[in-house]
Amino acid sequence: MEHKERLNLSMLFDFYEMTMANGYFRQGMGERVTYFDVFFRRVPDGGGFAIAAGLEQLVEYIRNLHFDGEDIAYLRSKNLFQEDFLDYLRTFRFTGDVWAVPEGTPVFPGEPLVTVRAPASQAQLIETFALLCINHQSLVATKANRVVRAAQGRTVLEFGSRRAQGVDGAVVGARAAYIGGVHGTACAISDQIYGVPAAGTMAHSWVQMFDSQYEAFKTYCEIYPTNAVLLVDTYNTLKSGVPDAIRAFNEVLKPLGITKCGIRLDSGDIAYLTKEARKMLDAAGWQSCTISASNSLDEELIRDLLLQGAKIDCFGVGERLITARSEPVFGGVYKLVAVEQPDGTISPKIKISENVAKITTPHYKKLYRFYGNDTGKAIADYLTVYDESVDDSHPLTIFDPDATWKKKEVYDFTAKELQVPVFRGGELVYALPSLPEIRDYCLRQVDTLWDEVKRFDNPHKYYVDLSQKLWDIKHSLLEQNG
C-alpha cells in the first residue's frame, strides 16, 4: 500500500469516539447538547501551578473538522457503521460553543481549561485532539517556565528538536516552550511557521573540519562577524579552546570594532570551566563576551550551577525541556459534566471513583480568579455554577474543597472570569493573539503569583474553591450515586 501523503487530522480520534458517536446517532441522541471539561488533576514535577497552552492548534483543528470520501471509505471498511451515519459524516462540521482559558495562563488542578458545549456526537469526536493539543503544549510550557525561572533572568534557548518525540513534538513543542518563557529555539521551522526566534552558530563538526581549531574559529568570525559564538570544548576548553577564541576575536572582530561575541561549552565541569573562562576573557579585555552552556540541562541543574557560581549568560536546554523528561505526561482529561434537556434546563453529571482524585466536579461552570487590590497578586480561584456571579465588593469566605475545615476570607479583591468565548455556534469569535503577545501575557500572569506558589520544592497550595451552590450539587450527586 502506498504511503498516504494526505493527512486529515479529523481522523485523529480514538476509535471509541466514533463508535459512541454512531451509537448516539442510532439512539437519536446525537443532537443532545452536552458539556465537557478539559482539566488536569496534578501539576507536573510537584510544582505549584501549570501553564495552559495549545489552544491555537485546537482552534485550527475545529475550524477544519470534516470527513472526506477517503475517510468515509475507511470507516465503511470497518463494517460497523450504517450508511445513514456515514452520510451524516459527509456534511459533518462543528456547530457547538467553546470557552477556554487563554494560552499562557497559570492554571491549577481541577479547573476547566476548555469547556465544550456541543451536540453529543460532535463533542465526543473532538476529545482526543483536544487532549492532545492541551496536554502536550501545557506540559512543555510548564516545564519551560520552570527552567526560565531557574535561570533567574538569564537567556534560555530551546535546543531539543533532535531529541523530541516526533515532528510535532519538535515544532509545536518549541512554540509551547516560547509561551513558557524561553527566548528562542534552535528549530528553524518553528520560527518559519510560528515566529519563535531561531538562532544557532556551530557544532563540534565545524571545528573538526579544519586543520586547526584556531582556523575554524577565525573563519567563522570572518563569515559571521556579528554572530560569532564559538564552541570551545571540542578539544581542551582552557588550554586551547578559550585561548584560540580570544585570538580569533582579537584578530578578526577587534579591528572591525565589534565587541559582541560569545563562547559556548557543551561538556565538562560547566561550573568550573565557565568561571575559569570568564577570568581568561576578562583578562584579555573581552568583558563583553558572553558565555553559553548546554548539555542535558534542566531547572535543577541550572539552579545548582548558579549556586556554584557558574558564569553563564545563556542556557541551551534540550531533551529535558522538549520531552519534559522528569515527568513526560500532563494528565489532562476530557469529562462529561452536564447534559442539556430539550426544555433548556442543564442537568449536571458526575463521575465517581474509589480514587477520590478521579471524582469530577459536575455542571457547566464559570471559573474566576481573585486578585488582591492592594498587591495585584492572585489570592485564589473560584468555581461556580454557570448562572452564578461573584460580587467582589463584599468579603467572601472560601473553603478548601479537599479539607472543608480550612477556610479563608477574601476581601478587597477583584474577581476576573478566566475563560473566554472561543466558538459560538461553530463560528470562531476569539481573536487569536500573536505568539509574542501570549508569551508576554504568560510572564505577566506568572508574576501575579506569590513566590510561595512558585517555589520548586513544597510549593504553597493554591486555593481552587467551589461556590456553596456548586459544592451542594456535587455532594448531592455523590449521595445519590454513592
Image (cartoon, helix red, strand yellow):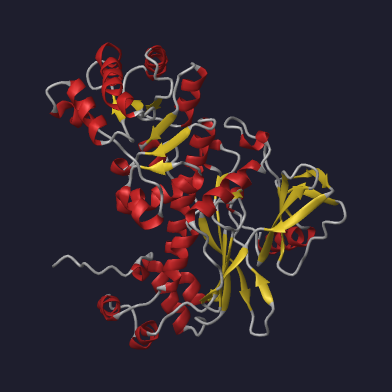
Q: Residue furthest right?
A: 394
Quarter the N terminus occupies: bottom left
Query: Residue sitting at 26 percent across and 21 percent down?
Result: 251
Q: Residue at x 47, y 56 (%)?
A: 54
Left/right placement of residue 218 relative to residue 87 reads left
Residue 364, percent from left and from top: 65, 67
Q: Is residue 108 left or right of residue 29?
A: right
Please tell me how many numbered marks the rendered image carries: 0
Which residue occupies the foreground of this view, 127 or 227?
227
In the rendered image, is residue 323 in sight? Answer: no
Rendering coords of residue 16 (x, y %): 40, 68
Q: For this rendering, which residue is in front, 208 or 327? A: 208
Residue at image coords 87%, 51%: 395
Residue 461 visible to an observer of this rendering: yes
Quadrant (top left/top right/bottom left/bottom right) for the C terminus:
bottom right
In percent of width and height, residue 120 lies at 51, 76
Please say if 77 is above or below 240: below
Query: Could you tell whether 240 is left or right of 44 in the image?
Result: left
Q: Position of residue 346 (x, y in %)?
A: 67, 75
- Residue 476 occupies which quadrant of the picture? bottom right
Give the quadrant of residue 347.
Answer: bottom right
